Amino acid sequence: MSTTSHTPSTAPADTDARPSARATGRIGVFGIGLEAYWDQFEGLEDRCRGYQADVERQVAALGGAVVSAGLVDTPQKARVAGDLFAREQVDLILCHVVTYATSATVLAAVQAAKVPVVLLGLQPTRTLDYEHVDTGEWLANCAACSVPEIAGAFTRSGIPYDTVAGTIQDDERAWSRIGAWVRAAGVARSLKRARIGFMGHAYAGMLDMYSDFTMFHGQVGAHVEVLEIDDLQVRTDAATAEQVAAKTAEIREHFAFADPSDDPIAGPITDDQLAWSARVAVGLDALAEDFELDALTYYYRGLDDNPQERLGAGVIVGNSLLTARGIPTAGEADIKTNLAQLILDRLGAGGSYTEYYGLDMDEDFVLMGHDGPGHIAIAQEQPVLRSLNVFHGKRGGGLSVELQVRHGDVTILGCTQTADGRLKLIAAEGASIPGPTFRIGNTNSRLRFDLDPVSFLEAWSAEGPTHHVALGVGHRIQDIEAVARLLDLELVVVGRDAAARGSRLGASSNDRFVAHRPDVRGGGR
């Protein structure tokens, strides 16, 4: 079989891995005012309704499915708005504080839906001609007036909320934060309806992998579909010659073939190996379709070249293709990291299955990767297939995937379990940087964070993580924070203070800082 060179990828240079992966959240939106004002100040109600419509248009442009309750100006109308939001099962509520309104005008509008609320203190203008403004003009610009009152009422009523202040138009900071909430609402909606396949069993002895499936049903809303290796076997056996041929062509399109002539650990890629990986990939496609899977966690040891061992050794290529089209896969049965992959995928960031490979103290980076599937849609260059005689620590051999994650901004996201059984997210932002990596048929990338490698590993390990993470492109902490709050999950961001001082992605630091998010059930930030 001929070999091909490691050629540059044709992937777009933006930070999105797969924009089509984004889910659409239902965003309840309403504006507030005080009914007593309308007869007192001519034109004020119409202006407030216009400002509210403008906000709703911009929320829709961010990708949210807007459920509008219009302008609410009495407690009675607030009750109607609340019933609407509950009936439409919104994922998030945006309360636009257009002008002053009593907190009683707001509370009933948000209680029934039982989702977090974002208070939008958005003014029409940045400043006013103070000496010539009358009361009506002031009221058209006093978005800040009742935000503290509503925040106090929400806190005492146990309603989780956030506050975004700024202007309705031309405010990058404010709309960036609102955009994060809109995207997070889509992710939360997707996760609450996700079906995660769990095929096989955890890698024996990896205690951090062991998970309680009820956590995922109860805390996130996702459904865990327990699968047998036999479910894959029957679908692999049923693959037709035409399906295998088509999948083989797809593999040739997406992967380069490693040249083994100067590589002592790899052999030539044979026609039989390629055909087997293609056949298993057809079986995986059928498995995902038949069980309506949004993600897949798997591992099966097998024994002495039995069918289960050969299946387990043949899934890497097919699972890489599944991951690239929005069904992220995680080996060693790490369902918690699979959830983290799903979060990043639905944010359009990718989410490649990854672990710590080593610390380079001289060049100031962490080498991270994994054997098994990689997210080929976020590869820096065309992913390479290697034929491995031995899968280290696992039985069998066959085709494995080698790639670096796209150079530039990246985010890693881990998911672990606390001693009291709660799911917990751990995240950090950094950069994928150029440089040589291992040529061992594994994904591996050079990642540089805001802390030096030693301090970063110490800070990360202090949070009781699993040893895997999801690796995605772009800086996504702002979005992940919103996702965590919508799902009521603890989030720890490692190295946040260094990022706040300014990136040191070319310097060195021994600072260590871990930021804990507040409990959203208690109210505000």
Image (cartoon, grey):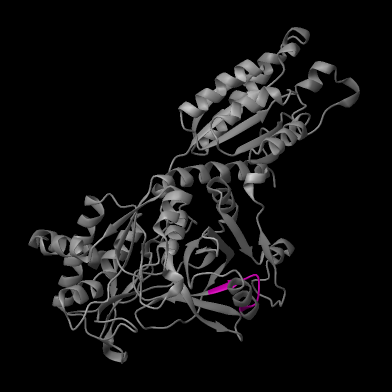
Residue 85 is situated, as x and y percent measured from the top left of the image, at 51, 28
- 12 is higher (above) or lower (below) than 192: below
Q: Quadrant of residue 58?
A: top right
Residue 19 is situated, as x and y percent measured from the top left of the image, at 42, 49
Residue drawn at x 76%, y 26% is 141
Residue drawn at x 22%, y 66% is 229
Q: In front here: 17 or 455?
A: 455
> Residue reaching furthest left?
241
Q: Relative to 62, is 103 on the left or the right?
A: right
Q: Relative to 91, is 94 on the left or the right?
A: right
Q: Quadrant of residue 103?
A: top right
Residue 463 is situated, as x and y percent measured from the top left of the image, at 60, 69
Q: Which quadrant: the N terminus?
A: bottom left
452 part of magenta stretch: yes
- 366 is higher (above) or lower (below) than 318: below
Residue 324 is situated, as x and y percent measured from the top left of the image, at 35, 59
Count the marks.
Answer: 0
345 part of magenta stretch: no
> Residue reaching furthest right?
131
Q: Is residue 346 visible?
A: yes
Q: Is residue 380 visible?
A: no
Span of residues in magenta: 447-453
Residue drawn at x 39%, y 47% is 20
> Residue reaching furthest front?
420
Residue drawn at x 39%, y 45% is 193
Q: Relative to 422, is 196 on the left or the right?
A: left
- 250 is higher (above) or lower (below) than 62: below
